[in-house]
Image (tube, rainbow, N blue to C red):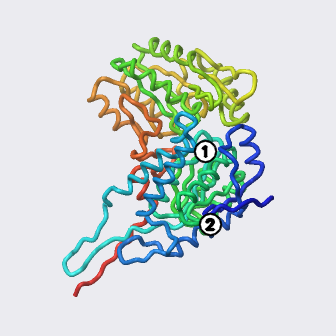
Amino acid sequence: MPQRGDPAGVQVDLDDGDVRAEREAGLALGEVQLLAQGGGRAVRAAGAVLGGRRCLGPGHDRPRDAPDPESGRGQLHVLRRRLQQVGGDLAGAHDQLGAGTVDRAAAGLQRPRPHGPEPRGTSAVSDCTSRIFSIGTCSTADASCANAVSWPWPWLLAAGNCCVLKPAEDSPVTAVELARLAAEAGFADGAFNVVTGVGVEAGAALAAHPGIDHLSFTGSRPVGTAVATAAAANVVPVVLELGGKSPNIVFADADLDRAVPLIVNSIVQNAGQTCTAGSRVLVHQSVHDEVVARVRERFEAVRTGPGPDDPDLGPLTNATQRDRVAAMVGRARADAELVTGGEAPGGAGFFFPPTLFDHVPVGSEIGQQEVFGPVLAVTTFRTDDEAVELANATEYGLVAALWTGSVGRAHRLAAELDAGQVFVNTYGAGGGIELPLGGTKRSGYGREKGVEGLLGYTRTKAVVVGLA
């Protein structure tokens, strides 16, 4: 493997084939000069920064190069500005690169901590929020290529940890560029590390490495199970975000002018390649025909094209994913009514049109499995109880949305939906950065984002001092 220039603060295991593939797809952000490093060296670099000292409480000196939450906030803001500059040529690209995530993660550091010293009689009882040390975060091609990198890294850095990031093999260059920008923003050498390569090799080695103190994985359930197994073997915590089959539930009293545009956007955004995509519509039978007609009209008006053209719908991540989506759509024709879309266009690019299926049986493949493409499945219901039953009838439980004019119904049904996030008369595809995101059932466990996500990358230690 050829050696290249070594930017400060970046430890990278770079697979040249990954870089070529991404450059051929036109996704590279620019020339990135790197020194190839082994995954083990990246973990050791992270560990060396912290020097084994983990407590962030008063009276504990931090190693000179260790990430400091106070200085880290300023570094995150610097990184945000650089990300905006890099991504400024594409509408919304700076947030995809993580600028919005970084900004709000840094802002979260300013919130009061829910811990502090508390005297109790003759003893002083306090707690010490500790860094978890070095953290591995991985993503896979079938679940997070639409996002340049997975969610957790701003939170774990904001909490004072070091990061070893394994991006999806189909999109490594953005993560490498992010590491270079982090070094430019002033993060300590070894605080942010990137290991690229195929998941079954580089990802598996990272997950099993004994120097990793916490794992975070965004991807498919089979790989998530393997990551959880590796975490269990080393007895370290893990956060899993394993996708969803999220429903928009439209009641007879819904404001369709407000609902339909967001329903369409929730499945068209990132070409449906988000774990939180609104891939199902459960609609009351009295408004079914109107909802289907409106969605069809909007689907057929969607502009498709490459990212630099700022279209409504971009490509799928690679030919394999396009073929997978096409195969699932082909099989769905036997179970449901194809309303629009369904055929990949000819020519260059991995494009697939917005595809709408009606009268989808709840137990069918298209009604149960994550497609990870712009494919929407519609099913009708008659009663509130039936709507909840249908919404909860998949093995996933990540996001759901209720569209109704009744506040009472919204509160009652939100409590009955088995999902980690529930929206009412809106749909945020994961919501704001300040909202905790995580699933139930086979969608995984643990939370990303929000204060809960930040505290998930810390440890609480109780310290009791006798005051005799």
- Whole-percent x, y for residue 426 in the image: 39, 30
What residue is rendered at 49% in x and 75% in y?
63
Residue 26 shown left or right of residue 455 in the figure? right
For residue 43, which numbered disc appears in the image? 2
- Whole-percent x, y for residue 291 in the image: 45, 16
Residue 196 shown left or right of residue 255 in the figure? right
Q: Is residue 159 above or below residue 51?
A: above
Q: What residue type is labelled 1?
A: Ser
For residue 409, which numbered disc appears in the image? none
Q: Which amino acid does label 2 sit on?
A: Val
Q: Between residues 235 and 94, which one lies in front from this camera angle?
A: 94
Tell me the quadrant of the picture where the C terminus can be found: bottom left
Tell me the quadrant of the picture where the N terminus can be found: bottom right
Q: Is residue 253 above or below residue 105?
A: above
Where on the picture, by quarter, is residue 242? top right
Q: Between residues 101 and 341, which one lies in front from this camera angle?
A: 101
Q: What element carries label 1?
A: loop
Residue 128 shown left or right of residue 266 in the figure? left
